[in-house]
Each structure stands twice: as structure tokens, then as C-alpha cells.
Image: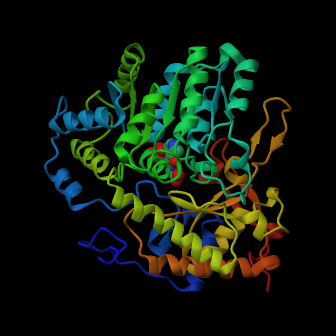
Amino acid sequence: MERELPFEPYRVKVVERIHRVPREQRERLLQEAEYNIFKVPSAAIYIDLLTDSGTGAMSDRQWAAMMTGDEAYAQSRSWEDFEATIRRVTGYRHVIPCHQGRAAENLLFGALLDERHVVPNNTHFDTTRANVEFRGAVALDCICDEGRDPQREAPFKGNMSIPKLEAAFARYGGRIPLVMMTITNNSGGGQPVSLANARAVAAVCRARGVPLFLDCARFAENAWFIKRRETGQAGRSIEEIAREFFAQADGCTMSAKKDALVNIGGFIALNDEAIAQKLAARLIIQEGFPTYGGLAGRDLAAVAEGLREVLDEEYLTYRIEQVARLGQRLDGYGVPYLKPAGGHAIYLDARAMLPHIPPAAFPGVSFTAALYLEAGVRACEIGSLMFEHLDPDTGKIVAPALELVRLAIPRRVYSNTQLDYVADACARVRDLGPRLRGLEIVWQPPALRHFLCRLRPLGGRSLIAV
Ligand code: F0G
């Protein structure tokens, strides 16, 4: 019998040197960054798992497309390729280029939302929530119950709860101008949404005459999960599954920095001509002419090529199984994380590892800071620092359901050996246990505070007790 193929469907053509700076230097840099990992210089980071967004490696074909990109202001060849590829992949008629996902959100919500409105989503990503709330509207998460339980193994924990969505319509009725659905569900652990759930959500929206938009940053990874996990889907191509998923909705916002395999880019695609015209008019003010939208021609060309490449099932298998493999290493150490492993990231359960640190003292931030200090690895808290918010009914501050630390895996970048090092580092930080202190905020901006806030260990002492 023929042997199994090797794991990576690539060979390396360009390399980038990385360094692990000495521990004393990491300690100093962490203090200078005031324990905000976003402020630590990239050159002093050994393995950077802060995000999978814009951090992937482009292919030789993408770099070639960059070189032949057409920089004409209007109607460039690269735009034609971008538009045609997005139309083919999504099936939507109108394509609005944007420089990244949040620009797409800003444009769409700027055109459709005001302070009376409520937007249901399975779980809003942080910029999506911020863009809804910036209009004075309410961002309402309607995640299914299994999506709230970090230890429960279920195939589609990103699904939207149909009863919660129906309850939102019963309660807010005419105040809901659109419903969003995030695939895969980043803030809920990179968990996929099933086709069956998309059909059910679409039926609820159609019955109310309300459009459904996908936040489709990781649509190809979502389609791979459907192929592997949903009954009757195994024989279909990723492209077919993705097309059917898009067909349930009326449009999408996309951060191309994820599943279009590029370092910058995004778009809105949709069927409604009147909305498309409104968006194009706003686009000219905010981003650029409607055939480039804040991007260079070469960026458009790289997105088009990336969207073709991401539909390759062998790539997706390597990609998602690399993340799962990191999960298995963590299982070996007994490090708890949100099960099953997500498509683009592992979400460590900081509350379970650091039960002595309450949400208000940010256990996820404490773990993240210690992971950098101990190993030079950069992760990202997805917990109270990022998602604590005001309950619109009670006016009280509520912590999110989970205190997580995300290890986001850039696409086509790190080897399994490097990820083994990360798993080992996580186990060592977990073993610090009660020696690890919580943190307090010294200063914070009014919105998206995790990016800019300044922190210090509680009581102004060291992060790790001796
Ligand atoms: N929607 C989702 C689901 C995302 O994950 C992101 C970005 C955005 C929208 C915004 O896109 O960054 O291009 O403006 N997520 C990154 C992350 C930042 O680290 O998960 P953007």
C-alpha cells in the first residue's frame, strides 16, 4: 500500500530568522509594556501566537501576483480578478473592497444601524461588537448552550441558538435591521457553524424579512469542519459547501487577513443593489474608489489568489490538524482548553488553571504575561479584559462566560516542533499555579481597552511570587 503523505503540503522557499531574547530582557520589556502584550516589540518575541490575522505566509503564486498587480486607479485587472473570484466563491453579485474586516463592518453598520437597533450574532468578535456599539446599537450574542461549556465536546459549538434568536425577534421585533453570523465563531473558540444551523437561522430571518450577513473571515475552515463533521457532506468539495453556506445569507463581511491568506485586505459582498450603491458611495469617502477600496492593486491580486488557494482541501487538512495536534500535546500535559480544538486557535481555560484569580483580576492576562516571561511566547487574552461589558437591562458590568487565552496559529508559518515548545511552555506556566498574581488596570481607553490599556500586578508586586 502507498504510504501516507507527509503532513505539510509545502516546502519552504523563504525563511525569517527569529530569536529568543534572554529572560531578564523579557522581564524588562513586559514591565515597560505595562503588562499589555500588544505593546511588546515583535523582535523580542520568539513564537508569536497573538493572532492568525495578517500573519500568514503568502505562497510563491501570491508573491508572483503581487509583482504583476495592476495599480490603475480605476477598473484595474487586479480588481477584475478580485471581483470575479469573490463572486464565484460567495455567489453574491456586488463586491465592495475594504482594507480589512473592521473597515467592512464600519461601512456596513454605518449604512444600516442607528441607536434604536439590536444586532443578534452567534458571538460578536470584538471589533464587530465595537462597531455595533459605536452606533449606539446593542450587540446581542445568541450562542447555543453547548457553545458556553468549555469542556463539552460537540461538533458545531459555533451554532446560533434558534430559541434565543426567536426570543430576540419576539422582544425587539422591528429594531433588528440585520442578523450576523460569525464563521468560524472566533470569540467562542474558533468553533464551526453547521449548514443545518445556517439554514435554520436563514429561515427565521426570511420569515421576518431581515437580511442575514456572515462574518466570514474563516469561511473555508468552517467548510472543512462541515465536510468532516456534518452528515451527508463528506463527498462534497470545500468550494461546494462554502457556496451553499453563502447561499443561505444575503451578504458577508470578510477580513481577508484570515482565510484569504494575505497580510492585509477585506471586503463586503452582497446581493442587494440599493445597499451596495449606498456602500459604494460611502466607500469613496472612507476607503477609496470602489475598484480598490483602500488597497493597492497588488493586494487585490494577492487576495484573489489566496481565495483560490484556501479552498484546497489538503491545505485545510494540514492547517486544522496542526491546531488539533497542538491540542493533543496540551492534553498530554493536562492543560485545559476549550474542547474541541478550534480551526485557527486553541483557547486555554485560564479560569480552570488559575481559580485563585477572580475575573476582575484578569486570570487570562496574568497567564499571557507569564507565558511571555517564561518562554517568549505571545498569546492573547479573550476574557474579562477584552469582553467585560455593560448589561443593557441592568446597567451592571458583566464578565464574559469564559476567561480564555488564545493561542492563534498563523497560516503556513510555524512548525510542529515550535508548537511542541509552546505546549511545554503552557504546562510550565500552569504549574506556577497560585504563585501567579492577578492584575489591575492603571489606565484604560473608553473602547477596545485591551489594545491600549496599562496594567500592573495586584498590589504593585511581581507577577510571579517567589
Ligand atoms: N471578524 C472576525 C471574526 C475576526 O476574527 C476579525 C479579526 C474581524 C472580524 C476584524 O477583521 O482584523 O481585518 O479588521 N480578528 C483578528 C483576530 C484581529 O485576532 O482574531 P480585521
**Is 240 situated left or right of 304 in this image?**
right
Image: 103 above or below 360 = above
Give the quadrant of residue 70. top left
Q: In the image, residue 279 lies at what x, y percent?
A: 40, 22
Image: 418 above or below 452 = below
What residue sits 65% from the left and 66% below the top?
35
**Residue 28 in sight from this viewpoint:** no
**Is 194 situated left or right of 56 in this image?**
right
Query: How does the figure colour the protein chain or chains?
Result: rainbow
Task: Pick the quarter of the image with the N terminus.
Answer: bottom left
Q: In front: 17, or 301?
A: 301
Q: How many labels does the image show?
A: 0
What residue sits 61% from the left and 40% below the top?
124
Q: In the image, residue 175 lies at what x, y percent?
A: 66, 17
Q: In the image, residue 349 lies at what x, y percent?
A: 71, 64
Task: Pick the quarter of the image with the C terminus.
Answer: bottom right
Q: In front: 43, or 178?
A: 178
What residue sits 35% from the left and 60% below the top?
315
Q: In the image, residue 153 lies at what x, y percent?
A: 67, 58
What residue sits 67% from the left and 82% below the top?
428
